[in-house]
Image (cartoon, coloured by chain):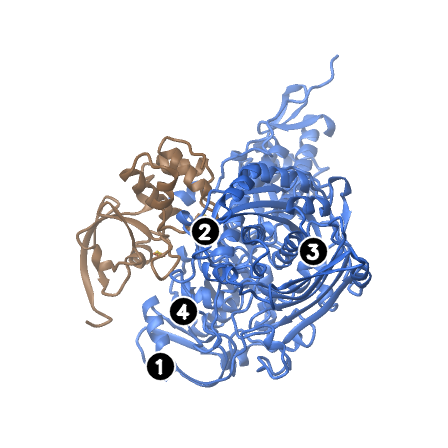
Amino acid sequence: MDRSDTFDIEFTLNGEAVAATVPARRLLIHFLRDDLDLTGPKIGCDTGHCGACTVLYNGRTIKSCMMLAVQADGATIETVEALAADGEMTPVQQAFHEHHALQCGYCTSGMVMSATYLLEKNPSPSPEEIREGLRGNLCRCTGYVNIVEAVAAAAGKETSA
Amino acid sequence: MTAPTRVETPRWTGQNYPRKEDRRLLTGQGRYVDDRGMIRQGYAHFVRSPYAHARIVSIDTSKLENMTGVYCTLVGEEVKEMTDPLFQIAPPPGGNMVEYLMAVDKVRYQGEPVAVVLAETRELARDAADLVEVKYEPLPPVTDAIAAQEPDAPILHDEVGTNVSWQGTYEYGDIDWALSEADHVVKIDKLHFHRFSSTPIECFGVVVNWDRGTDTIEVISNNQMPMFGAMMIAPSLRIGIDRFEFVSQDIGGGFGIKINLYKQTGVLALLSRKAGRPVKWVETRTEHHLDGGHGNERWFLDIEVPVMADGTILGVKARAIDDAGAYLHYEPLGAVIWSQVLPGCYKMRHFRIDYSQSLTNKCPTVPNRGYSRMQHLWMLERIVDVVAHELGFDPVEIRKRNYVQPEDYPYETPNGCVYDSGNLPLSLDKALELVDYPKWRERQKEAEGTTKRIGIGIGSTLDSGTNNFGQSRIINRELPFSGNGEAAICKLDLYGEVSVALGTTPQGQGHETTAAQVVADILGITPEEVTVIPGFDQARNSYVGFSGTYASQFAVTGINAVIGAANKLKAEMVELAALVLGASEEEIELAEGHARVIGDPERAIPFIGLANMVYTNNAELPTEVAERISLNCRHVYVPPFDPPDPDRKYGNLTLTYASQIHVAVVEVDTETGKVEVLDYAAVDDCGTRINPQIVEGQVHGAAAHGIAAALREEMRYDEDGQLLNANFLYYHAPSAADMPHIKTDWVESPSPFTGTGAKGMGEGGGAPLHAICSAIQDALGTDVPIVADSFNPPERVYRLLHGEGLGAGRGVEVVAKGGS
Ligand code: FES
Ligand code: FES
């Protein structure tokens, strides 16, 4: 395979069908951001640790910096842009707003995707389960206190620890 | 007749108004530098040195010459021809340093850029950079700040002639007298404050275009102190400041590190000029760890502390050796900035601190949250704890005895700084109460003799804010800097809209929200009705040389600039309305989007009516105000400072002193050395709070940085100067699962010096490092060496438990004097 090889792919992105030709080595995150102008997902590392690039891939959270764009072929992908598509923020986004669970906002796209996925799997997590569930997303601004509170609030319960 | 009554307008200042910035950030609509670009841009990639110290023998870019899609290369030698060396803050010898925007002849740390490649895509730029052939002749590196000062150490900068970039003695009171009169002298061999970085999740990024037509340089970046960057690089590029337009919108965390983004900006501007097209560059995480900038590492040696029998600590004598890394970026300002908090929270009056700074073959240090004060405060808190442990004082009582007391404010420190307000004993009580201190003392007793020991520690800090830049003259008396300030513009737009432009570059501090809150109160509208233009743009003309977001000062400099601008606008609106409504200015109030006569709401003119007269209907504008009123008001806030006296190293170095008192409860596993935080509390006092929720968020963030730094994070170099953790795989920034819950409370001691009573805050003074080291010491007791390093991973605690510390023996000695 050569660096200039390209592949044709088709997939569903935020509810819409997309067909594209992508270079073999392009990362999914770069494809989303640079080629499709979906700049909601961010890039914060080069080892798959920060989670800023988190998107939903066939309904599960993945780190889109750890996948190639060609792997999107046939998949259903959702980014943070899909969440408030009708103009109304989701309960998770609303709770982040009310509980001041974001500062610089750079981790937020990924964090909100992971929190949404977490609540789908476990609608009433304990604070420990929230912390564990967000293990793959680093935030350097908030110390996580308000993030944990926001997720608990979105789950319909308050937390004190 | 009854007196006119004012309509009560809601007060927005002081409320937890939810942030105006949030919606765009939560929906993926923020605009960070990597989200932006320019038409025809190429992507840049730097070629970096694999060696910590080497001579550059040759750089060969010939393989790239005919590569399709590669636009251009630039090497150090070319940079040298086109530019002048960067301006140095240091006086000689450090000031003799010849530093170009990119390495010439020699590299001095691993990851230092030697060339840069511009290509059509990110991937191609990276591949092409790999084909640049650089021949190096490795030189012996020096990575230890103490060894760097030895006579036989390899010299980094020949023109400096020494690795000591700055040296000065800070002497106040009479420490020799204090040491001879004290009942005890506690001697500590060595303390080491380690190197780490707050590692913002967003790395550096620059999109730059040197426009050939206008000869102007547009810079979209995430520089958090853009005018400092412009001041540094404009002379080097041989151009005026007015050639630049620095722009930013959202910035993904900064914590001081993003002050360091100026050399790259200069190189990329040259690359853009050479290529004749815009350049985009975004740093990778690995590059950020190698080259972005680290917090200062510092050694404290030969510490002597005079203590009276009742626990009064008289002062400190010590040598401090700071490790600046390979170049002086913002340094050696840190060599004076620590002295803003010379006695910390304590009434100590006698000091001799011999401070020097070493150059080493490591990444340059830059301001990092708690900059330079946290290192010093950590030493002071270690001293207080060691004194308490060695002499048998209660760690709470000894602090309360030595704290500056509530009735002492304004308190002048031995070096002329004026602590504005505070209540340290109350703050400490509240922090202890949050963790239920008596309960943990019980638990500690129960755990005695087991393998899970419990320790409780205190960190008392000051978060000094609003620098007097005159302190730079204590470093170098030739420098033309003093005071501080910020600019803001507040205007009434054509249809009566209120908009505000700031000079700051927030990275999460919520300036759009807090600025809107104070403007709403002044103009009698809601924060919703105030548009604070996001981000920074030099073209808005809302800046001074100090503009930016750093050093815990927005609540003072930024907000006072906004208040000044809004008050000027209000004065113009009131004057105009009074003329139009035929009333006196005293009779006019602004409320609900109108200027109206108090008590006579019928006589009113809406904001749009005032704007109309000035913008589009000025034949009807009363002649008294024509050409005088613009409804576009700029204000520059100037804090009340005098230049300090460089001979005595004396003067008021910062305007406000917020305090943070933290309490940590830890469990130490004696079998593994692992430290777990069981409970954590932080009490903040930053005077009057404009938005308490935002303040609390800053407290959480600063606490998290310190806790992680104390237990998980170190930028670790081996003796060859190779950074061992240049990514998040090996550099352990914590996740939610790794962090404890942080309990918070506050005390509110308004500052008498800021008009609003608010104090700058956010850095937090590194309180968790102090509290956790204190707690570990408390758990280990006095049978083992003292906790002498600020970084305490399991292996280090394990070694302490087995008798291995930093200094000789236990690293501490107590000399009893005068038979006591
Ligand atoms: S950018 Fe994907 S995990 Fe960091
Ligand atoms: S809000 Fe800044 S990294 Fe999370």
* Chain B representation colour: blue
Q: Residue beneath label 2, please?
A: B451
Q: Position of residue A96 (x, y in %)?
A: 42, 39
* Chain A representation colour: brown
On residue B44, which mark appears? 4
Of callouts 2 and 3, which one flags the residue occurring earlier in the amino acid sequence? 3
Of callouts 2 and 1, which one flags the residue occurring earlier in the amino acid sequence? 1
Q: Position of residue B629 (x, y in %)?
A: 67, 41
Q: Position of residue B513 (x, y in %)?
A: 53, 40
On residue B295, which mark appears? none
User: Is the residue B266 above or below the residue B667 in the image?
Assistant: below
User: Which of the two discs, 4 and 3, sits closer to the camera?
Assistant: 3
- Identify residue type, mark 4: Ala
Check if mark 2 and mark 3 are on a common chain: yes
User: Which of the two discs, 1 and 4, sits closer to the camera?
Assistant: 4
- Identify residue type, mark 2: Thr
Which type of secondary structure does the marked residue at label 4 adopt? strand
Of callouts 4 and 2, which one flags the residue occurring earlier in the amino acid sequence? 4
- Identify residue type, mark 1: Glu
Q: Is residue B399 visible?
A: yes
Q: CA distance from mark 2 to mark 3?
A: 42 Å
Q: Nearer the viewer, residue A115 or B802?
A: B802
Of all chains, the one bearing label 3 is: B
